[in-house]
Amino acid sequence: MSIQHPGGDPNANLYAQLKQDVLERIPHITTVEYVPDDVQAKQLQATFDPTRLDPQTGPKPPKLIIAWYRQTPHDWFRVNYTDPNTGFHAGWHQDEDHPDLGRAHFQYKTETSEDRWEITFEHETPSLILWEIIDELLEKVLPTYQSSTHG
Amino acid sequence: MTEETPDGTTGLRDRQTTGEDRVRMVARQLSEPKTANWIASEAEWSHEPTKRVLRRLVNDGVLRQDDSGTHTTYYPDYRQQAMQEAMRLRDGGRTVEELTDRLAEMKGQIRDWEEEFEVESPNQLRATLADENLGPAEEARRRDIAREWTHLQRRIQIVGFAIREWDFLAPNAEHADARS
């Protein structure tokens, strides 16, 4: 995907699409904002309603921050979930940080443990990769690494 | 994550999107021309309805269709997406002066990097990783800045377009208003 001019740029409207295709369709998410704002649009930030998560960890809203750049041959992206109630972090990264772990890796960190390993995605489409990540976060990652506070 | 979850329900994606939604998502984000078969498989939807949606997207100018090969292929018209982004900025509630300030800010950020690293482009900055004896933290920082620099250059082009064509991009409702 060589980009000579804006008319051929697959990044121009990408965040608006991720917002519309994925984040705005998730009932657990209350707001989606561009970071630092929609002019620079360096990242997208989604805020979760803490009462809709299972398990519930506390009153502060967890956040998902997405940085995504389309490029050839493979996109560069980092999708990071943080929970201010527990300090829990989970990240899905397709970047240059851990070439030993292949193209993409998952990493997590709790107060007592941390680990990272290689992952692969079923799809090539950014919006569908983000759906894979969200499904994994809600169905597997949170129930596995977060414990309920009932507080 | 399309298989059923252990308790026999489908995942959130399949509850919140239709096959038609997913075909549209896939089609708008293709990075090379693809056949209807490939798109149907990526969107996990059946072939005939996928073709119907693709035809509609071609008619709407979202996709371009190429019949010159053995199989018809489809590719997004990224011009339309750049226009949508410019319109989004035009309708974002800012004045043209505010948007111009932001444009100047982004250009200032790039000038700062040019001065700090004594380079003129993101690739020249990336090349400094080979030239100099940098630690891993500084290497990572320069890679991040190079990526951000490329991104800001793209944003400057779109914001510049929105400013240049400010009056042309005015939404209908504004024609009746006093000029700002």
Image (cartoon, coloured by chain):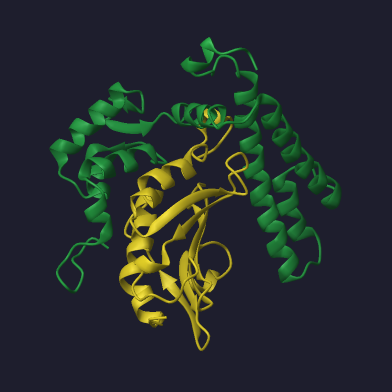
Residue B80 in the image: state x and y as whole percent.
44, 27
**In the figure, B14 relative to A57: above or below?**
above
Image point 57% across, 63% down: which residue?
A: A96
Figure quadrant of residue A144 = bottom left
| Residue B68 vertical placement versus A112 (above, below) | above
Q: Where is residue A98 in the image (x, y as percent from the top left)?
A: 55, 71
Total marks in image:
0
Image quadrant in which you'd find residue B70: top left
**In the picture shown, does residue B86 fall above or below B18?**
above
Q: Looking at the image, which is closer to me, B74 or B165?
A: B165
Task: Provide residue A18's location: percent of width, then percent of height.
Answer: 42, 47
Residue A23: give x, y in percent of width and height: 40, 52
Kindly indicate which chain is depicted in yellow in the rendered structure.
Answer: A
Q: Which residue lies furthest to the front in this view?
A: A151
Chain shown green: that is B
Residue at the image point whose x is 63% and y is 42% from the top: A40
Q: A47 or A23, which lies in front?
A: A47
Give the residue displayed 49% in from the left and 19% down from the top: B171
Quadrant in which the C terminus of chain B is drawn: top right
Lateral position of residue B115 relative to residue B82, left or right: right
Above or below, comparing residue A23 to residue A117 in the picture: above
Q: Can residue B70 be seen in this view?
A: no
In the picture, measured across the screen, residue B126 lies left or right of residue A130, that is right
Quadrant placement of the N terminus of chain B: bottom left
Q: Can residue B18 be seen in this view?
A: yes
